[in-house]
């Protein structure tokens, strides 16, 4: 079993490399996903808590309309997707993760039939342009081009990190804001909740 600290260090290295050079994901994807495959069975019990979800919940609370469709990227065992379903009574929620064992767990833990879970790569999503009125991710490497592509005009994006800069998968919110603004989003607000932080942005009227 790989030591937790080594897993966290590896996650930070991959995040830094892929955020700077997205093409490296092709090389790093398989070992990165494998680290999550190996811990899927106990992920929910050992890592998911109200504090873990707090920054994402804060961003969701600031979304001013109930989205018809939502996508949770890097959903893991589905905690983020379930948070969306709790917040919005009628939203159809899709959770995506590259780890099959994580998605297996998410499907078992689904809170209702409004949730759907797919195994998919967040760098090349299998959904049409503008499919989702809300896109979220918690502790996930952001693939900004795909986030922008699948977000509907006037849709919202929430990016959250449960432990702020101490999160193994971490991109500074200033960088997140800059990358989203380059792709036609406007900044709505930043949030601090629990030990974490989040950002909410809205896409322009047209793609």
Image (spheres, helix red, strand yellow):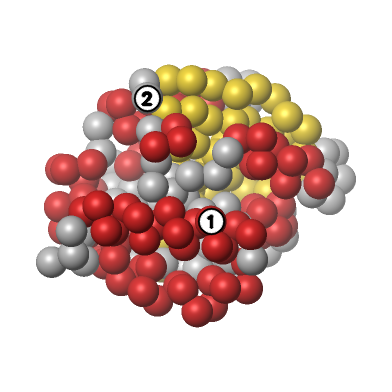
Residue 50 at what x, y percent from top left? 28, 27
Can residue 144 be seen in the rendering of this structure? Answer: yes
Q: Which class describes the residues within 10 Å of circle 2: few (<14), some (14-19), or many (20+)?
A: some
Residue 186 at what x, y percent from top left? 78, 33
Q: Nearer the viewer, residue 191 or 109?
A: 191
User: Which mark, residue 195?
Assistant: 2
Asked if 23 appears above or below 45 in the picture, the reply is below
Q: Which class describes the residues within 10 Å of circle 1: few (<14), some (14-19), or many (20+)?
A: some
Residue at the spot 73% in from the left edge and 29% down from the top edge: 187
User: Which mark, residue 162?
Assistant: none
Residue at the spot 15% in from the left edge and 43% down from the top edge: 45
Cα–Cα span, label 1 and label 2: 21 Å
- Spot the residue most to the right: 206
Asked if 189 appears above or below 175 in the picture, the reply is above
Which mark's residue is nearer the viewer, 1 or 2?
1
Residue 182 at what x, y percent from top left? 81, 46
Can residue 126 be seen in the rendering of this structure? Answer: no
Secondary structure beneath dot 2 equals loop
188 relative to 42 in the view: left or right: right
Asked if 158 appears above or below 124 in the picture, the reply is above
Res. 96 image quadrant = bottom left
Residue 88 at what x, y percent from top left? 48, 29
Circle 1 is placed at which residue position? Answer: 16
204 relative to 178 in the view: left or right: right
Res. 18 image quadrant = bottom right
Res. 35 image quadrant = bottom left
Asked if 32 appears above or below 53 in the picture, the reply is below
- Spot the residue most to the bottom: 27
Secondary structure beneath dot 1 equals helix
- Tell me the quadrant of the picture where the N terminus can be found: bottom left
Q: Nearer the viewer, residue 66 or 22?
A: 22
32 relative to 131 in the view: left or right: left
């Amino acid at each position: 079993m790989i030591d937790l600290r080594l897993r966290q260090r590896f996650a930070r290295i991959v995040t830094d490399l892929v955020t700077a050079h997205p093409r490296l994901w092709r090389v790093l994807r398989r070992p990165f996903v494998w680290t999550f495959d190996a811990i899927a069975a106990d992920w929910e019990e050992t890592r998911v808590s109200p504090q873990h979800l707090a920054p994402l919940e804060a961003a969701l609370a600031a979304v001013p309309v109930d989205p018809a469709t939502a996508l949770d990227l890097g959903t893991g065992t589905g905690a983020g997707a379930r948070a969306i379903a709790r917040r919005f009574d009628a939203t159809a929620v899709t959770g995506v993760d590259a780890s099959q064992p994580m998605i297996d767990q998410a499907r078992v833990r689904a809170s209702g039939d409004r949730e759907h879970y797919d195994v998919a790569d967040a760098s090349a999503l299998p959904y049409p342009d503008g499919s989702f009125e809300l896109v979220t991710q918690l502790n996930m490497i952001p693939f900004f081009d795909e986030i922008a592509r699948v977000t509907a005009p006037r849709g919202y994006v929430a990016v959250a990190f449960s432990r702020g800069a101490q999160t193994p998968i971490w991109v500074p919110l200033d960088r997140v804001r800059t990358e989203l603004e380059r792709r036609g989003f406007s900044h709505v607000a930043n949030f601090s909740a629990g030990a974490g932080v989040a950002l909410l942005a809205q896409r322009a009227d047209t793609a």
